[in-house]
Image (spheres, grey):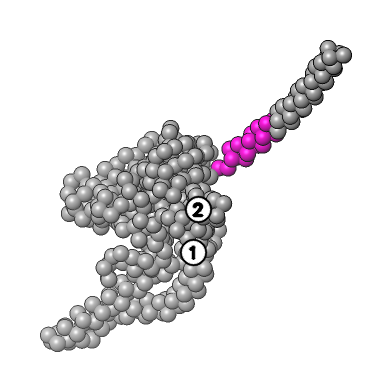
Amino acid sequence: MEKEKSLEDLIGLNYTRLGFFGEVQVKIKELQESNLKLEQATQQMQAILGGITDVMAVISKDFRVLSVNDVLLEVFNHAHPQGAYCYEIFRDRHQPCLKCPLVCARDNNRVCRELVIFPLNGENRQFEITASPLRDAKGQPSSILILKRDVTLEKEYQAKYYQAEKMATIGLLAAGVGHEINNPLTAISGFAEGLERRLPKLKKRLGQTEADQQLLEDFEEYVETIRKECERCRDIVVNLLTFSPRERVELSPVNLNNLVIEVLKLLRHGLKERPQGLIRLKLEALEADVKGVGAELKQVILNLVLNALDAVANQGEITIQTHTAGDHWLILAVEDTGCGISPENLDKLFEPFFTTKPVGQGIGIGLSTCYNIIRQHGGEIAVKSKKGKGARFEVKLPQIR
């Protein structure tokens, strides 16, 4: 009986073991399914993170980079950012930035946003930075999630839209003002010409005394001054009217190289007093023309060259360049090595009546007129400059295809 009992016990023990192993197998299967779901969730999360086009990084409270997405590796061209300081990667600095959204999020335990401009790959870029605290079980920031969105193009298009809207408003105002000024100007100019025609009769009636001759000379000078100033005012009015939508005019093929040569011929007399070789030409043999109004485009070139001459002040160099850009555009560039333009003035250059010249040397509608003319030709005009390092104005016009 003892042996039979032992056998039964052994059989029971085996059954118990089999039940245990069965439970283990069930647990293993559940664990495998759980791991599969976790792996699928991880892959799904990675796919979501991979679809984010903004720069993303998780950074410790002491500015160490913990993890990043692929976009950061591409934008900042850094192979192994983990462990490095964020200001080394983002700003190429050796200490934290003075105004940092990470510090704001860490110290205030809230989401902080900042719009910053800093150089990247040789050009200034605008980034909208969002810093969000990742909190621990006690609700305190354990690390910071940083999102950087490049909004450079967005801001540029926004600025162009505001500029176009502003120019349209000014155009309506300029049209009304211009036409109102033209009426009295026409009368003044007409009467001045009438007085000028009567000068021969006045000479006959006046005597030959010194007083009479002095009176006649004064009279001639005054009439000539009135007539010339009327012409000057008329030119200003014409410039003002270019802000308003012009009447439909016939556009014809225009060669940019020929326009440059014609403008330099107009300046030939004034250039004699300047140093030799002040203006360099780099005119590419253009196989295509632009469709436009030659007189208006000459006005643009003349204005850009005159501004460059003012900037160099006989101590620099001016380069006038033409070339093609792709299959659709012709480029005219006027570049100087002069005094340059202050950063705070760059965005205002094409605004009407804005000028950096002394009083009496300009009223600030030259570049505004250029902007409007180029816009009406379906083109673009832009400027790049640094204070003390010259300026480059570039005009882009659609070529005839």
Does any portion of residue 168 appear in the rendered image?
yes
Residue 161 pos. (x, y %):
52, 58
Task: Tell which residue pokes out farthest to the front in this image.
Answer: 1
Please state which amino acid type lies under the numbered disc 1: Met
Please tell me in which quadrant of the rendered image residue 356 appears: bottom left
Residue 394 pos. (x, y %):
39, 48
Mark 2 element type: strand
Say which mark, if any, is on residue 167. 1
Residue at 41% from the left image edge and 47% from the top image edge:
63
* Residue closer to the observer: 275 or 269: 275
Mark 1 element type: helix
Binning the other alpha carbons within 10 Å of mark 2 as few (below 14), some (14 to 19) or many (20 upward) gives many
Which of the marked residues, 1 or 2, is nearer the chain's N terminus? 2
* Residue closer to the observer: 255 or 397: 397
Residue at 46% from the left image edge and 63% from the top image edge:
242
Residue annotated with mark 2: 141
> Is residue 247 located in the magenta-colored stretch of the structure?
no
How far is mark 1 from mark 2, CA to CA? 49 Å
> Where does the magenta region start and end?
35-53
Foreground disc of the pair 1, 2 = 2
Q: Is residue 328 left or right of residue 360?
A: right
Please state which amino acid type lies under the numbered disc 2: Pro
Residue 81 pos. (x, y %):
43, 37
Residue at 35% from the left image edge and 74% from the top image edge:
230
Q: Is residue 173 left or right of residue 355?
A: right
> Is residue 46 located in the magenta-colored stretch of the structure?
yes
Say which mark, if any, is on residue 69. none
Name above or below for residue 159 compared with residue 144: below
* Residue closer to the observer: 400 or 59: 59
* Residue closer to the observer: 330 or 163: 163
